[in-house]
Amino acid sequence: MSKHQAMWDGSRHTLGMDEMDNTHREFIAQVAALIAASNAEFPALFQALVSHTREHFTAEGQLMRASKYKGLPEHESEHHRVLGELQQLNRTLKRGHLPLVRAYVKEGLPEWFDTHLAMMDAALVMHLKKQQTGITDRSSALP
């Protein structure tokens, strides 16, 4: 069994920004529901995951742009790659290749999420928090 599981692990997954943490918690809950889903339930749940992921990535992209995040090109290209994979898998699913998509959801997706969160999202949160404290520090210097 893979060490990456579709379970929220507060010590590993919490980044300390409620909006992102809540979105990530929802993502993991959807992946867990997909793993547990019957073959009949799976396609609709997978479609919901694709939609949720698109919204999640769009929101993060807006945060990165608004905060002038220097890591935006790499982070966003990773988002585009994964969303592209999910959309391709959705087409594969519609052609009836359920086992392939199930394997990706069970193995590939939790592993990607853990890595992306640790490498890219954690760096983004550090940038956002630094910026927020910077804004606070400057405003407190005003007379």
Image: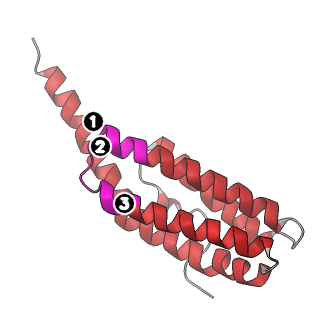
Can residue 4 be seen from the camera position used here? yes
Query: SS for tag 2?
Result: helix
- The quadrant in which residue 95 appears is bottom right
Can residue 6 be seen from the camera position used here? no
For the residues labelled 3 and 1, the Cα–Cα distance comes to 20 Å
Q: Measured from the top left, where is residue 18 in percent x and y?
A: 48, 42
Mark 2: few/some/many CA within 10 Å (<14, 14-19, 20+): some
User: Where's the N terminus, which quadrant?
Assistant: bottom right
Please, is residue 88 above or below residue 24 in the view?
A: below
Residue at image location 21% in from the left, 30% down from the top: 135
Residue at image location 42% in from the left, 53% down from the top: 15
Of the numbered discs 3 and 1, the one sitting upstream in the chain is 3
Tags 2 and 1 touching, CB below 8 Å: yes
Left or right of 59? Residue 127 is: left
Residue at image location 72% in from the left, 75% down from the top: 92
Mark 1, residue position: 132
Mark 3, residue position: 75
Q: Residue furthest bottom?
A: 1
Q: Amino acid at mark 3?
A: His
